[in-house]
Image (tube, helix red, strand yellow):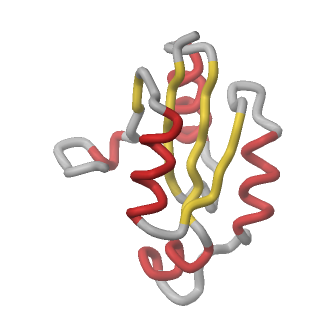
Amino acid sequence: MKKVFVNGTFDVIHRGHLAMLNFAKFHGDFLLVGIDSDRRVKEMKGHDRPFNNQETRKDIMENFKAVNGVKIFDSDEELINMIREYEPDIMIVGSDYRDKKVI
């Protein structure tokens, strides 16, 4: 079984998110999605975010056909541990992370 991993805030779902999730699922058998906690979204995107709380974002993500599992993380350390525990064969990042350092 080939495992794939993606992560992000997924606060306002748009066509690019759907394309990335379908692309990720195409490349593996099981797609795990990591979602930033509400605290992290607020820290990264401003005090008026997230628009949708972490449980709503998790519920929405779990209902996409391409997604097999969703976990919420609250720190870089939790994200790193999630990735280490899952041991993905492939990690997919969005185009907004092109040429940027990722965990």
Outermost top residue = 1
Q: Is 50 left or right of 92, judged from the image as shown?
A: right
Q: Is 82 left or right of 90, judged from the image as shown?
A: right
The residue nearer to you, when weighing 27 against 20, is 27
Is residue 35 shown above or below 47?
Answer: above
Q: Quadrant of residue 9?
A: bottom right
The percent coordinates of residue 75 (x first, y second) are 45, 68
The residue nearer to you, when weighing 5 against 14, is 5
Is residue 2 shown above or below 21?
Answer: above
The percent coordinates of residue 31 (x first, y second) are 61, 28
Q: Is 97 left or right of 69, judged from the image as shown?
A: left
The residue nearer to you, when weighing 56 against 70, is 70
The percent coordinates of residue 78 (x first, y second) are 48, 60
Is residue 66 shown above or below 75?
Answer: above
Outermost bottom residue = 47
Q: Is 1 left or right of 91, judged from the image as shown?
A: right
Q: Residue at x 40, y 41 (%)?
A: 94
Count of all numbered marks drawn on residues in the image: 0
Q: Residue at x 81, y 52 (%)?
A: 59
The residue nearer to you, when weighing 96 against 44, is 44
Q: Residue at x 61, y 14 (%)?
A: 29
Q: Quadrant of the N terminus?
A: top right
